Image: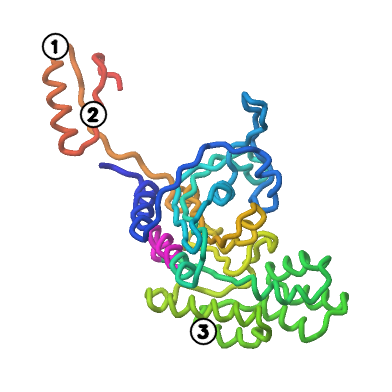
């Protein structure tokens, strides 16, 4: 059976997730608009395709899968629901290019999230990237550090400080902190946060300078556990620490990460811990997951050529012979195209 490379990856990922106990989750193509309207800042884009249903409700074509999965999650106390999906989402493109239908494959864990679950999700993120190419990196951050540092400054400065950390702009951080009269010791920690990048294993000692309160010490311990787990999975060199990965603190907490493959200028995988999102949706549960943007694979591999085909001419009076010849070729796995009676394709 002939499969395009992106189709091969999808089948590989489904098999990978199933082997670790994940069950396929199917969603409808649309959801009540109110769900997305209340959580616009969680979405990649706040622009949505909407329509009025026959019952008068305003509906939206899904711009996101995670929100729907969390909304419908009902894990038993003390357990974890583990699901995977391969669905299309509908988002506005950049530069006013209109809406796009984007294929996304991923997984979500909801419930009593423990250290093993977090480490398993990180491992599956790495192996998802490896299904595309062995030339990949998973870059990880921990919002516990950013949250703890920002809690010491005026909330009005949080977004601007986070943006400067995300931009890896120590000069801008220094200037803003000086203007806002932020203590030099805290300024240095924010600059260290922006400058830190490299293999997680190598940078764990550096994090000790930041882990000086219960919240940052807990974050350090979680990153250390991930490093230990990645060693067990033989993935140590594939996980890098990068605090410039910043997500909305209103929805995310703890680990956040992005996956890159050599040859694409943007991340093809993103995920993280989103207990705060679950709480906003009235769920007293933990959540962690990631999505792989399958639509980017065409850019990664380029336009695949069609499978070569055998041209079989059909002439009047040769119907049986043509049928037999075409069946013999397709039985060999070949692609056949029979021309018309006049020889036209």
**Badge 3: residue crowd in 10 Å (few <14, some 14–19, many ≥20):** some
Closer to us: 338 or 205: 205
Give coordinates of residue 292: x percent, y percent: 49, 54
Q: Which colour scheme is used?
A: rainbow
> Where residue 328 sits: x, y (%)?
13, 31
Residue under numbered circle 3: 202
* Residue in view at x 33 percent, y 54 percent: 15
Q: Which residue is drawn at 67% across and 26% down?
A: 56
Q: Is the magenta stretch mostly helix, strand or loop?
A: helix
Element at label 3: helix
Per the rendered image, the range of residues in magenta is 123-134
Q: Is residue 44 above or below residue 242?
A: above
Please determine whether, in this image, residue 345 is positioned above or below residue 44: above
Instruction: Residue under label 1, please give it.
Output: 317
As displayed, is residue 26 above or below residue 322? below
Is residue 71 placed above or below 114 in the rendered structure? above
């Amino acid at each position: 059976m002939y499969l395009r490379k992106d189709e091969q990856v999808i089948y590989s990922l489904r098999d990978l997730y199933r082997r670790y106990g994940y069950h396929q989750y199917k969603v409808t193509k649309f959801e009540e608009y109110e769900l997305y309207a209340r959580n616009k800042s969680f979405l990649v884009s706040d622009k949505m395709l909407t329509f009025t249903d026959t019952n008068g409700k305003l509906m939206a074509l899904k711009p996101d899968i995670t929100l729907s999965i969390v909304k419908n999650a009902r894990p038993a106390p003390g357990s974890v629901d583990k699901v995977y999906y391969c669905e299309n989402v509908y988002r506005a493109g950049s530069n006013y290019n209109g809406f796009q239908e984007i294929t996304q494959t991923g997984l979500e864990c909801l419930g009593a999230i423990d250290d093993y679950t977090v480490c398993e999700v990180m491992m599956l993120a790495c192996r998802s990237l490896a299904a595309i190419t062995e030339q990949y990196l998973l870059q990880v951050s921990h919002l516990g550090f950013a949250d703890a540092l920002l809690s010491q400054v005026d909330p009005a400065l949080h977004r601007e400080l986070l943006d400067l950390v995300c931009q890896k702009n120590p000069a801008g951080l220094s200037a803003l902190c000086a203007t806002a009269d932020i203590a030099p010791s805290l300024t240095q920690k924010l600059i260290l946060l922006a400058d830190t990048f490299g293999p997680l294993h190598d940078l764990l000692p550096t994090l000790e300078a930041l882990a000086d309160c219960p919240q940052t010490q807990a974050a350090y311990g979680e990153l250390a556990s991930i490093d230990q787990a990645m060693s067990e999975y033989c993935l140590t060199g594939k996980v890098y620490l990068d605090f410039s990965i910043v997500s909305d603190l209103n929805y995310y907490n703890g680990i956040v990460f992005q996956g890159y493959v050599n040859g694409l200028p943007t991340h093809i995988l993103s995920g993280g811990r989103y207990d705060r999102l679950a709480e906003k949706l009235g769920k007293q549960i933990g959540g962690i997951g990631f999505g792989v943007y399958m639509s980017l694979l065409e850019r990664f591999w380029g336009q695949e050529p069609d499978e070569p085909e055998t041209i079989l001419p059909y002439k009047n009076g040769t119907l049986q012979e043509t049928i037999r010849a075409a069946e013999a070729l397709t039985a060999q796995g070949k692609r056949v195209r029979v021309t018309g009676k006049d020889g036209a394709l």
